[in-house]
Image (cartoon, grey):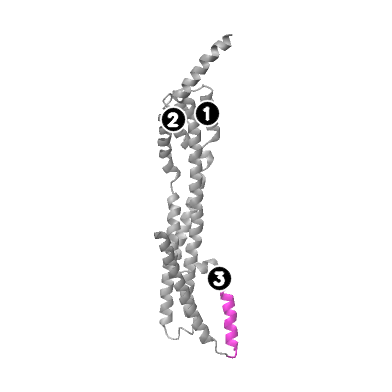
């Protein structure tokens, strides 16, 4: 409810700013509506305006004012940690398939005991090896105890997987606020320009404030929207990795728990008379 009220509040503020800009612009158009014969100077100025309207990206950023600097810093940080998380959350680093396949195969075939399984887990630095090691140390324990061990081990590796994801959430929250702050600064400059003599008839005095007010808001939103998408993507990827780790750990627990070992011994005992016969 509070977030909805905040959205409505800022929506009304932005609507009021746009309405004020429309009024100011309309007043300037009304004063410029007096018919006049075009002069050579006016024709030259129009040509100059056409040329100068084509601004480069750097010039547009300069027009946004001082608040474009923290927005650029936020965008740089977002890109840096986007690549860092993309590399750190690779499947080959979190769940190396060859290692997992070899480990589970050796346990299933009875080629590993408790000490051998723990030693094999130490050969890998992956998060799933850390969970497997915690499970292997409970070799022969009841399944309920092993399941609790899996939960505890997953809780220990989760902070490392979620590292830096809050940074994207912070960018999503901060960048629109920086854009709104730039809008406020631009409106202050706009009012200063309006208060000057003959400002209503000289749109060039209003252009800087209007440009800064609109550019910073647009820049903040253009940064916040991709950062939100990145945040949601990595959160979903982390959840999928944790689900996969849990499934593989449950598979291992089903082979080394006390109940599984007892069933295996009973199966071997029953198979001996049949083999002898």
Tag shown at residue 135: 2
| Magenta stretch holds residue 26 | no
| Magenta stretch holds residue 46 | yes
Closer to the chain start, of discs 3 and 2, is 3
Q: Nearer the viewer, residue 243 or 225?
A: 243
Tag shown at residue 67: none
**154, above or below 45, in the image:** above
Residue under label 3: 55
Q: Work out which residue is located at the far top of the displayed protein and give it.
A: 277
Image-quadrant location for residue 146: top left
Relative to 39, is 228 on the left or the right?
Answer: left
**162, above or below 227, in the image:** above
| Residue positioned 57% across, 12% down in the render | 274
Residue under label 1: 104
Label 2 sits on a secondary structure element that is helix
Q: Nearer the viewer, residue 79 or 133?
A: 133
Label 1 sits on a secondary structure element that is helix
Q: Position of residue 26 (x, y in %)?
A: 51, 81
Image-quadrant location for residue 172: bottom left
**On the rendered image, what quadrant is the N terminus found in?**
bottom left
Q: Position of residue 147 (x, y in %)?
A: 43, 32
Separation of disc 3 and disc 2 at Cα?
62 Å
Separation of disc 2 and disc 1 at Cα?
12 Å
| Residue positioned 43% across, 74% down in the render | 187
Q: Position of residue 20 (x, y in %)?
A: 46, 76
Label 3 sits on a secondary structure element that is loop
Q: Position of residue 129 (x, y in %)?
A: 47, 33
One can see residue 42 in this view:
yes
Mark 3: few, some, or many residues within 10 Å (few <14, many ≥20)?
A: few
**On the rendered image, what quadrant is the C terminus found in?**
top right
Mark 2: few, some, or many residues within 10 Å (few <14, many ≥20)?
A: many
Q: Which residues are magenta?
A: 36-53
């Amino acid at each position: 409810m509070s977030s909805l009220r905040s959205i409505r509040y800022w929506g009304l503020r932005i609507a009021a700013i746009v309405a004020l800009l429309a009024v100011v612009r309309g007043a300037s158009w009304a004063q410029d509506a007096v018919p006049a014969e075009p002069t050579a100077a006016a024709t030259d100025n129009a040509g100059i305006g056409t040329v100068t309207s084509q601004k480069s990206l750097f010039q547009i950023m300069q027009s946004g004012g001082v608040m474009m600097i923290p927005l650029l810093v936020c965008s740089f940080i977002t890109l840096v940690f986007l690549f860092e998380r993309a590399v750190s959350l690779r499947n080959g680093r979190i769940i190396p398939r060859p290692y997992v396949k070899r480990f589970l195969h050796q346990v299933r075939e009875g080629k590993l005991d408790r000490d051998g399984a723990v030693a094999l887990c130490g050969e890998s630095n992956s998060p799933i090896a850390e969970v497997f090691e915690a499970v292997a140390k409970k070799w022969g324990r009841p399944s309920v105890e092993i399941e609790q061990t899996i939960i505890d081990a997953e809780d220990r590796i989760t902070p490392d997987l979620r590292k830096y994801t809050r940074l994207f959430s912070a960018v999503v929250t901060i960048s629109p606020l920086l854009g709104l702050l730039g809008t406020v600064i631009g409106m202050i400059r706009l009012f200063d320009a309006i208060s000057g003599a003959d400002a209503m008839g000289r749109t060039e005095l209003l252009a800087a404030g209007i440009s800064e007010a609109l550019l910073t808001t647009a820049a903040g939103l253009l940064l916040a929207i991709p950062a939100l998408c990145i945040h949601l993507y990595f959160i979903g990827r982390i959840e999928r990795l944790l689900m996969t780790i849990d499934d593989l750990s449950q598979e291992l627990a089903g082979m080394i728990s006390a109940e599984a070992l007892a069933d295996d011994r009973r199966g071997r005992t029953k198979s001996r008379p049949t083999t002898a016969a």
